[in-house]
């Protein structure tokens, strides 16, 4: 039962990330998650419980990133950037806006966790700069903001223009590779760094598909 609930929360997370939750009834959520209304109510009494479960999923992922070990290598730099991309993509503007409006306490928890992740990420970037893995002159605080703007704009553009997953992958993948190549000291290590992170890339593209290209069409 626990595994089925986790699987259901994953589906509901994808739905709410792409569409928000305010306009979606329990009936509609059940339909989009491809479960019966009765089964949805087995796990959740109301929409607030679903939103809470989705936020908890986000908090768990953020907490995992805060406790991940890393080495001062280009390979781990790419891994850290990929996880940053995954997290930014999951923090959709519509979900965060509705959460702030309808569930402010949950919103505060999520925003605090996101801020903690950002601070931790920037500290890691400073460490990598000090160890000459990435270029000293890069202002990663500004680059983080640029990443947020670019990723959300790219996703909106892809959805509005009915891109398929492959085209969206190319758009985001090219952006990430250009950014990595523009920030590392030894560009000869970049290709192998991406190869070493292929499994994580597969996870990211699957999340991208499940969130924005499978449920968005409802």
Image (tube, helix red, strand yellow):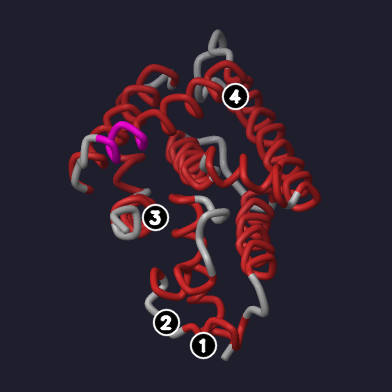
Instruction: Give me the C-alpha separation between circle 3 and circle 4.
Output: 37 Å
Circles 1 and 2, Cβ within 8 Å, touching? The answer is: yes
Mark 4 or 2, closer to the camera: 2
Residue 217 falls within the magenta-colored stretch: no
Q: Position of residue 112 (x, y in %)?
A: 76, 41
Residue drawn where x is 47% and y is 42% of the image: 89
Q: Name the residue under label 4.
A: 131
Q: Pick whichever of labels 1 and 3 is earlier in the sequence.
A: 1
For the residue labelled by badge 3, is the local secondary structure a helix, a strand or a loop? helix
Instruction: Give me the C-alpha separation between circle 1 and circle 2.
Output: 6 Å
Crowding at dot 1, Cα within 10 Å, few <14 / some 14-19 / many 20+, comes out as few
For the residue labelled by badge 1, is the local secondary structure a helix, a strand or a loop? helix
Q: Mark 2 points at which residue?
A: 35
Q: Mark 3 points at which residue?
A: 211
Mark 1 or 3, closer to the camera: 1
Q: Where is residue 130 in the image (x, y as percent from the top left)?
A: 63, 20
Residue drawn where x is 74% and y is 39% of the image: 116
Position of 178 relative to 13 (above/below): above
Query: Which range is magenta?
Result: 155-160
Q: How many marks?
A: 4
Q: Name the residue under label 1.
A: 39
Crowding at dot 4, Cα within 10 Å, few <14 / some 14-19 / many 20+, comes out as few
Q: Pick whichever of labels 3 and 4 is earlier in the sequence.
A: 4
- Which of these two is toward me, 149 or 16? 16
Instruction: Give me the C-alpha separation between circle 4 and circle 2.
Output: 51 Å
Crowding at dot 3, Cα within 10 Å, few <14 / some 14-19 / many 20+, comes out as many
Q: Pick whichever of labels 4 and 2 is earlier in the sequence.
A: 2
Q: Pick whichever of labels 2 and 3 is earlier in the sequence.
A: 2
Magenta part, dominant SS:
helix
Assign the N terminus to one quadrant of the image: bottom right
Instruction: Give me the C-alpha separation between circle 1 and circle 3.
Output: 22 Å
């Amino acid at each position: 039962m626990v595994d089925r609930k986790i699987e259901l929360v994953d589906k509901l997370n994808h739905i709410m990330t792409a569409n928000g939750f305010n306009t979606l009834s329990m009936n509609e959520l059940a339909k989009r998650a491809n479960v019966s209304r009765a089964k949805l109510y087995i796990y959740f009494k109301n929409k607030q419980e679903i939103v809470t479960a989705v936020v908890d999923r986000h908090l768990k992922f953020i907490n995992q990133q805060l406790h991940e070990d890393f080495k001062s290598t280009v390979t781990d730099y790419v891994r850290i950037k990929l996880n940053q991309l995954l997290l930014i993509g999951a923090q959709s503007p519509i979900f965060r806006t509705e959460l702030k409006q309808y569930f402010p306490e949950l919103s505060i928890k999520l925003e605090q966790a996101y801020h903690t992740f950002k601070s931790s990420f920037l500290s890691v970037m400073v460490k990598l700069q000090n160890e000459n893995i990435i270029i000293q002159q890069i202002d990663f605080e500004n680059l983080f903001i640029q990443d947020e703007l670019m990723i959300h704009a790219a996703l909106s553009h892809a959805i509005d223009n009915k891109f398929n997953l492959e085209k969206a992958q190319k758009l985001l993948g090219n952006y990430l590779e250009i950014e990595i190549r523009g920030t590392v000291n030894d560009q000869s290590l970049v290709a192998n760094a991406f190869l070493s992170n292929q499994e994580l890339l597969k996870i990211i593209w699957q999340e991208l598909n499940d969130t924005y290209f499978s449920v968005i069409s409802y």
